[in-house]
Image: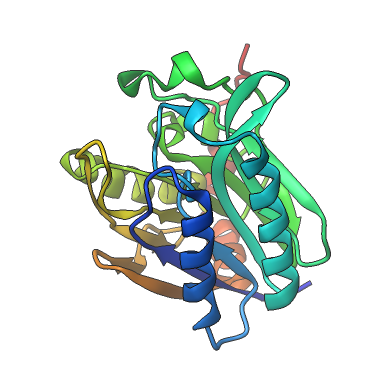
Amino acid sequence: MSEKLKVALIQTPLHWENPEANRTMLSQKIETIQDNLDLIVLPEMFTSGFTMSPQNIHPSEGTKTISWMQDLAKMSNAAVMGSLVFHENYQNYNRLIFAHPDGHMYQYDKKHTFTLAGEDKVYTAGTERLVIDFKGFRICPLICYDLRFPVWARNTEAYDVLIYVANWPKPRITAWDALLKARAIENMSYCIGVNRIGVDDLGYEYSGHSGVYDVLGNTLAFSEKEEILYVELEREHIATYRNKLKFLEDRDNFSLK
């Protein structure tokens, strides 16, 4: 068990529907990291951009990317996570992968598919939330549009870190900023949001705003440019304020049907 978790957030433009080019680009960025890290977080659909044409991504690319993530995790001795287009059993998923340095892999399929873009028409929604025990921290990974639904993120499992990977467009970036901070405060957990930047082939602009917030909603890291952000999370910070304030003990009891 570790008392601290060192995390890198990769805020980058993406090559449109080109997994090989994105893997090469991300490998080059990650090779520049010199610090010893525990976790590397990539954006949503980091091999393609937010495409609603999964048929343009060859079915083999999903397994290729997962193997790439596993190799990268082993080489860097840090877990690697992000979401990608994944084909399985004749269905398409916006699937988040958490590749552990020891070779273990965890997956989460996006629960709230983005109806405004028609994501619900081409990707199958997930039904189960994931909480990962990693180096003494309990991590709950979610994807983009999930951020707008606080019940899905509700901290009933004593997780320590809530992580959102996203392709969140510039026109609604104010909501992104506000909701990340709100999720941190209401769940008394660290909250991390990793967004892309640049303009995709459909003309949508992304302004980044990747950020990290502590259990009180204080900003620990934030960026609007192409860069790698670094942050160190502390178990003591979580324990201190949860024990002092005890807000989670007063939450309402209900269950999802």
Dividing the picture into quadrants, the one containing residue 38 is: bottom right
Q: Which residue is drawn at 35% across and 72% down?
A: 227
Count of all numbered marks drawn on residues in the image:
0
Q: Which residue is drawn at 73% across and 60% down?
A: 70
For the residue pair 88 and 150, the one nearer the viewer reads as: 88
Dividing the picture into quadrants, the one containing residue 154 is: top right
Where residue 169 sits in the image (x, y, percent)? 25, 42
Dividing the picture into quadrants, the one containing residue 197 is: bottom left
Where residue 139 sits in the image (x, y, percent)? 64, 53
Where residue 252 sits in the image (x, y, percent)? 54, 27
- Outermost residue toward the bottom? 34
Q: Can residue 44 be seen by looking at this rendering?
A: yes
Where residue 123 sits in the image (x, y, percent)? 52, 22
Of the 4 image quadrants, the one containing the C terminus is top right
For the residue pair 11 and 187, the one nearer the viewer reads as: 11
Q: Can residue 251 be seen by looking at this rendering?
A: no
Q: Is residue 5 left or right of 212 when viewed as pictured?
A: right
Of the 4 image quadrants, the one containing the N terminus is bottom right
- Outermost residue toward the top? 257
Q: Residue at x 68, y 50 (%)?
A: 64
Q: Is residue 55 left or right of 198 when viewed as pictured?
A: right
Q: Residue at x 49, y 75 (%)?
A: 28
Q: Is residue 186 above or below residue 28?
A: above
- Outermost residue toward the left? 171
